[in-house]
Image (cartoon, rainbow, N blue to C red):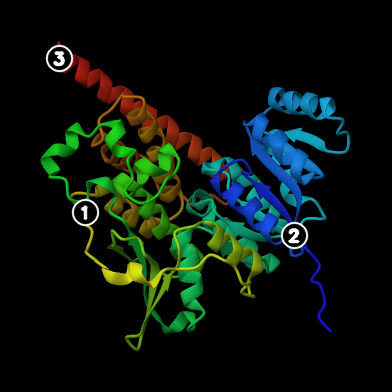
Amino acid sequence: MNTVPTPKRIAILGSTGSIGHSTLSIVESFPERYSVVSLAAGRNVEDALAQCLRWRPRVVSMADAQLADALQRKLNANGIKDIEVVYGSAGTIRVATLPDVDFVVSAIVGVAGLEATYAAVQAGKTIGLANKECLVAAGELIIAAAREKNVALLPIDSEHNAVHQCMRGGTRQEVRNIWLTASGGPFRNMPLAEFEHITVEQALKHPTWVMGRRITVDSATMLNKGLEIIEACRLFDVPASQVKVTVHPQSTIHSLVEFVDGSILAQLSVTDMRLPVLYALSYPERVPSDLNFDLKSLSQLDFSTPDFERFPCLRLAYEAAEAGGSACIALNAADEVAVAAFLNGVIPFTSIPRTIEAVLTRMPVTHPATIPAVLEADAEARSVAREVLSSAASMATTTRI
């Protein structure tokens, strides 16, 4: 006799973003398996309202009190009185730690979701991790807490999800190298002499993926792949020397694992984030879906070694991964500040790695022992990055005079 499984109860941190929408699409497709308990919706009131009307979560969190009030008024106007509206970091933590929640999808971009993700681990929730900055900034603390609480950290980021699948083919001791694939972004063939003149519009034209502005620029500098190196070291307990990057412009193979006997397992699938979401939600099962892969797309597979001169951010990420602790925090924080400056037309594309390197040089390496200490190091690195940019702007003005 077939039994109907009890639906897995889900909290989504970042419900109005792309991963949040992909997760809700999976819930829509498998209502007998998954249900929505709570949502952290950020700043998009209209999207949050639509999600409340459709999913009726118990709790929904907004970024601040004003946005929470706006959502509450809209819910009242629709006659909905049974959804608790909260806000800020405390609200996001409440969303992630409700007793009814079984599984937390961590998809808030940047360090904004760090406190809630750590709180969810401490509360014993299974984590579907789509926020690489959490492990980059506080991976040492999160991994330690997950081991202590016997909590599974299941990667949703496509590359690490692929590695997780390949690792099922052998033990950690049998792994020689983890290979992360990178498209190479829009500038993998551009002459280096032209990099100084790269425009924002050019940097935002990713050849494969449609993503947010920061992550698209990070893909163009390959800093995004650098953050993934650090995340892989922490998720799979390997040194940076065992995490390799290969440029694979077709983006057909999401990652590979090379074993000590010379065998290599590769994970291939459609470029649809619903698949890694489904894998994480259903693990260790595999649930039948309509996310089918067309084998004809394997007609050409190219691989090449990334050029550190072309992509200095990748070199900086390896150095930060080796140092660990606050070096990883500074790498991420400095990049976020530098990318914002580039997007606002303040600095050229080539100043992104220059700014990051200057911040890493200035910041002493420490190993924060608490989440507040991590956030303090993050704030300090951002302040140093702004000082670096201000100093560079002053020098440029003096030179012109």
Horizontal side, residue 276 vs residue 9: left or right: left
- The CA distance from mark 1 to mark 2 is 47 Å
Task: Give whichever of discs 1 and 3 has the lower sequence position.
Answer: 1
Outermost residue toward the top in this view: 401
Of labels 3 and 2, the one closer to you: 2
Task: Give whichever of discs 1 and 2 has the lower sequence position.
Answer: 2
Type of amino acid under label 2: Pro
Q: Which residue is drawn at 69% across and 36% down?
A: 48
In which quarter of the view is residue 239 placed? bottom left
Q: Which mark is residue 48?
A: none
Horizontal side, residue 291 vs residue 44: left or right: left
The residue under label 1 is 308
Of labels 1 and 2, the one closer to you: 2
Quadrant of the rendering where the N terminus is positioned? bottom right
In the image, 376 versus 354, the foreground residue is 354
Q: Do the residues labelled 1 and 3 touch (CB within 8 Å)?
A: no
Whole-percent x, y for residue 339 in the image: 36, 35
284 shown above or below 155: below
Horizontal side, residue 135 vs residue 13: left or right: left
The residue under label 3 is 400
Type of amino acid under label 3: Arg
The residue under label 2 is 31
Whole-percent x, y for residue 21 in the image: 60, 47
In the image, 305 versus 176, the foreground residue is 305
